[in-house]
Image: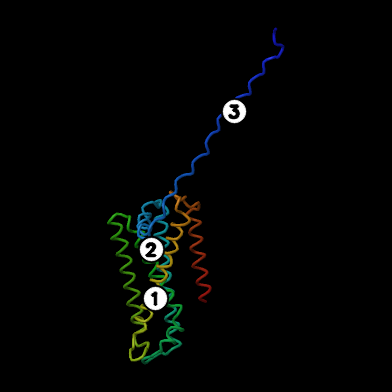
């Protein structure tokens, strides 16, 4: 006896699912020493036009800060005394010359950054820039020594020249600032940018950067006035 049931069509085969894309491997957290090495070696990866832009703006910024510092010392010394030896206590010197100490700290940190920027350059460029930096530094240091001679800071039985006092305080402050900057960069590289292998190039031009630097310097001049 023949069957009257019609054969059923087999269900369509389910296409195989594509496996989910694998996440890009993230680099393990780097150590503090490797982070410092990465910061120094990253100077080579800066594009040439941004490299020279940073060098030029860094030199102009140091020049501006040095001129501003000598003017501030002239203004403060006129208020203290015109002639004779002036002796300030530690608290008085720290309170009166706090802006000058901050400016000296900024010059020291900026000097270090400029030295890092000239590291990837050829020796002839390094010698030329170092000659300019050393000669300008000696010019302003000797100028300040002449202006601040006769002004001392008393701390107990010790009496320190004012220029040495401000330079020592600025150096200690610059060490703290550099440590905090390096620590922040290290934490960012370790916990935020651990999976990033390449950083994008800034999307602004030399004119934009010049306007930014001029505006920053102009703001400092207005605040000083």
In the rendered image, the quadrant that contains the N terminus is top right
Q: Mark 2 points at which residue?
A: 113
Asked which secondary structure carries label 1, the reply is helix
Image point (40%, 70%), residue name = 107
Residue under label 1: 170
* Residue found at the very far front of the displayed protein: 1
In the displayed structure image, the side of residue 113 where residue 122 appears, left or right: left
Whichever of labels 1 and 2 marks the residue nearer the N terminus, that label is 2
Front residue of 172 and 50: 172
Dot 2 surroundings within 10 Å: few (below 14), some, or many (20 or more)?
some
Q: In whole angstroms, how far apart are the C-alphas of marks 1 and 3?
A: 73 Å
Residue 157 left/right relative to 94: left
Q: Which residue is drawn at 51% across and 61% down?
A: 212
**Quarter occupied by residue 35:** bottom left
73, above or below 53, in the image: below
Occupied quadrant, residue 29: bottom left
Residue 173, image x, y percentages: 40, 74
Vertical side of 215 occupied by 122: above or below:
above
The mark closer to the camera, 2 or 3, is: 3
Q: How far apart are marks 1 and 2 (CA)?
A: 16 Å
Q: Where is residue 194 in the image (x, y as percent from the top left)?
A: 44, 53
The residue indicated by pointer 3 is 14
- First-in-chain label (1 vs 3): 3
Q: Is residue 58 above or below residue 97?
A: above
């Amino acid at each position: 006896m023949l069957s009257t049931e019609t054969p059923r069509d087999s269900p369509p085969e389910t296409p195989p699912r594509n496996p989910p894309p694998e996440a890009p491997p993230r680099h393990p957290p780097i150590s503090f020493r490797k982070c410092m090495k990465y910061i120094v070696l990253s100077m080579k990866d800066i594009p040439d036009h941004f490299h020279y832009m940073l060098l030029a703006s860094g030199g102009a910024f140091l020049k501006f800060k040095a001129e501003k510092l000598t003017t501030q010392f002239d203004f403060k010394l006129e208020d203290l005394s015109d002639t004779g030896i002036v002796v300030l206590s530690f608290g008085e010197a720290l309170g009166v010359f706090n802006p000058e100490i901050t400016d000296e700290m900024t010059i020291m940190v900026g000097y270090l950054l400029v030295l890092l920027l000239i590291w990837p350059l050829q020796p002839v460029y390094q010698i030329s820039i170092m000659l300019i930096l050393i000669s300008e530094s000696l010019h302003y240091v000797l100028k300040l020594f002449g202006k601040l001679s006769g002004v001392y800071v008393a701390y107990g039985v010790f009496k320190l020249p004012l220029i040495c006092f401000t330079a020592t305080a600025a150096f200690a402050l610059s060490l703290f600032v550099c440590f905090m900057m390096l620590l922040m960069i290290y934490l960012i590289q370790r916990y935020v940018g651990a999976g990033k292998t390449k950083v994008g190039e800034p999307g602004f031009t030399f004119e934009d950067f010049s306007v930014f630097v001029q505006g920053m310097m102009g703001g400092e001049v207005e605040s000083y006035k």
